[in-house]
Image (cartoon, rainbow, N blue to C red):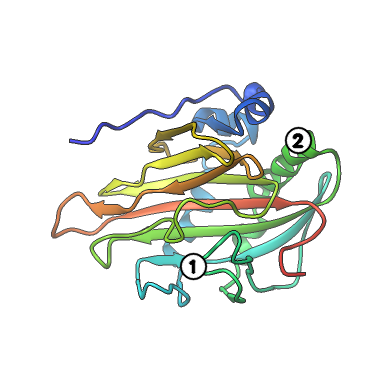
C-alpha cells in the first residue's frame, strides 16, 4: 500500500514567510476559517455549487472526468469587481496540452459570486499577493473543479507538472468522496527539491508562488472498483498586469 504523506500545515501568520522561503504554504481547515473570518455554515453555502458544475468539453485526452466553471475578477484592495465573461487562455509554455486556445466555460453562479465569503476570499488572496509582490490590482481567475471517476480514473492535472503563468495560485480542497489518490506534489521550478502530501480536510488550502514552484496532482480512482467517486477543488489565480491572453 502506498504511503500517504500528511500536509505540513502552518498557522495563517506563517503564510507569507513560507511562500518566500519555500514557494508554498499550507493551511488546514481551521486555519482557513480563521484567515477568512468564516462563520459557521458559510463554507457549506459555497460548496453546494459543486453539484452543478458543467462538463469540460475541451479535454484533449477524450476524457469525461472533469466538470468546471470559470469567472474572472479584478481585486484592488477591498474592491472586488467581476469582469465581463471571457475565455480562459494559457500559452503552450505553461500548458502544453490545452494551451494556445480559447476555452469558454460556463461562468460561476451569481449566488456564489455574491456570497460575502466569496468576496472576503478574493480580498484576502489579493492582499496576500500584494504582500508578496507589492500593492497593486490583481487579475483573478477562479476555477471550481470536480474530477470524477466516470472513466474509471480521473486526472486533476492532465497537463502534468506545470506552472500557471501567474503570481499566486490558491488550491482549496473542497471535498473528496469515495476515492483514493489525488496526491498533491510541489517541486522547485529550478531545482530537485519537492514535497508530496494528500489534502483531505474540506476547505484546507495549498498556496503556491507560481514563479518558484511547479505543481501537479496524481490521478484518482474509486475506492470500490465498481463504485463512483470525485474530488472537488477550487483553484484561484492572481496575476499582475492583466489577464493572460489580453
Q: Nearer the viewer, residue 232 or 23?
A: 23
Question: Horizontally, is 78 left or right of 36 in the view?
Answer: right
Q: Which residue is mark 1?
A: 97
**Horizontal and vertical percent position of residue 145:** 47, 59
- The quarter holding residue 168 reads top right
- x, y percentage for residue 245? 72, 69
Q: Position of residue 190 (x, y in %)?
A: 59, 39
Residue at (64% x, 64% y) in the render: 71
- Horizontal side of residue 188 vs 246, given as left or right: left
* Residue 196 percent across, percent down from the top left: 41, 35
**Vertical order, 150 against 45 (above or below):** below
Mark 1 and mark 2: Cα distance apart in space: 29 Å
> Which quarter shows the C terminus?
bottom right
Q: Nearer the viewer, residue 213 or 238?
A: 213
Point out the frontmost of discs 1 and 2: 1
Compare residues 245 and 67 and report the one nearer the observer.
Answer: 245
Position of residue 115 relative to residue 125, above or below, is below
Q: In the image, which disc is placed on residue 132?
A: 2
Q: Is residue 71 left or right of residue 149?
A: right
**Residue at x-position 33% and y-position 53%:** 219
Q: Earlier in the sequence, mark 1 or mark 2?
A: 1
For the point 74% across and 62% down, the residue is 243
The tag on residue 152 is none
The single residue placed furthest to the front in the displayed view is 191
Element under disc 1: loop
Q: Residue at x 37, y 42 (%)?
A: 183
Q: Is the Cβ of the residue at disc 1 closer than 8 Å to that at disc 2?
A: no
Q: Would you call the spot at circle 1 few (<14 residues within 10 Å), some (14-19), or many (20 or more)? A: some
Image height check: is 11 above or below 130?
above
Amino acid at each position: 500500500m502506498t504511503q500517504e504523506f500528511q500536509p505540513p500545515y502552518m498557522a495563517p501568520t506563517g503564510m507569507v514567510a513560507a511562500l518566500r522561503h519555500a514557494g508554498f504554504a499550507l493551511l488546514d481547515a481551521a486555519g482557513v476559517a480563521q484567515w477568512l473570518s468564516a462563520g459557521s455554515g458559510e463554507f457549506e453555502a459555497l460548496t453546494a455549487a459543486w453539484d452543478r458544475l458543467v462538463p469540460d468539453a475541451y479535454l484533449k485526452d477524450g476524457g469525461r472526468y472533469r466538470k468546471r466553471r470559470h469567472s474572472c475578477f479584478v481585486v484592488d484592495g477591498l474592491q472586488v469587481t467581476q469582469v465581463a465573461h471571457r475565455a480562459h487562455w494559457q500559452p503552450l509554455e505553461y500548458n502544453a496540452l490545452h494551451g494556445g486556445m480559447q476555452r469558454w466555460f460556463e461562468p460561476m453562479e451569481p449566488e456564489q459570486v455574491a456570497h460575502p465569503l466569496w468576496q472576503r476570499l478574493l480580498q484576502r488572496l489579493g492582499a496576500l499577493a500584494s504582500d508578496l509582490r507589492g500593492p497593486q490590482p490583481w487579475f483573478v481567475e477562479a476555477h471550481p473543479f470536480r474530477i470524477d471517476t466516470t472513466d474509471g480514473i480521473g486526472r486533476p492535472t492532465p497537463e502534468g507538472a506545470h506552472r500557471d503563468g501567474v503570481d499566486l495560485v490558491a488550491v482549496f480542497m473542497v471535498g473528496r468522496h469515495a476515492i483514493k489518490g489525488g496526491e498533491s506534489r510541489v517541486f522547485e521550478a529550478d531545482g530537485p527539491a519537492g514535497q508530496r502530501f494528500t489534502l483531505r480536510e474540506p476547505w484546507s488550502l495549498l498556496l503556491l508562488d507560481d514563479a518558484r514552484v511547479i505543481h501537479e496532482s496524481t490521478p484518482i480512482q474509486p475506492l470500490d472498483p465498481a463504485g463512483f467517486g470525485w474530488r472537488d477543488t477550487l483553484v484561484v489565480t492572481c496575476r499582475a498586469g492583466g489577464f493572460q491572453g489580453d
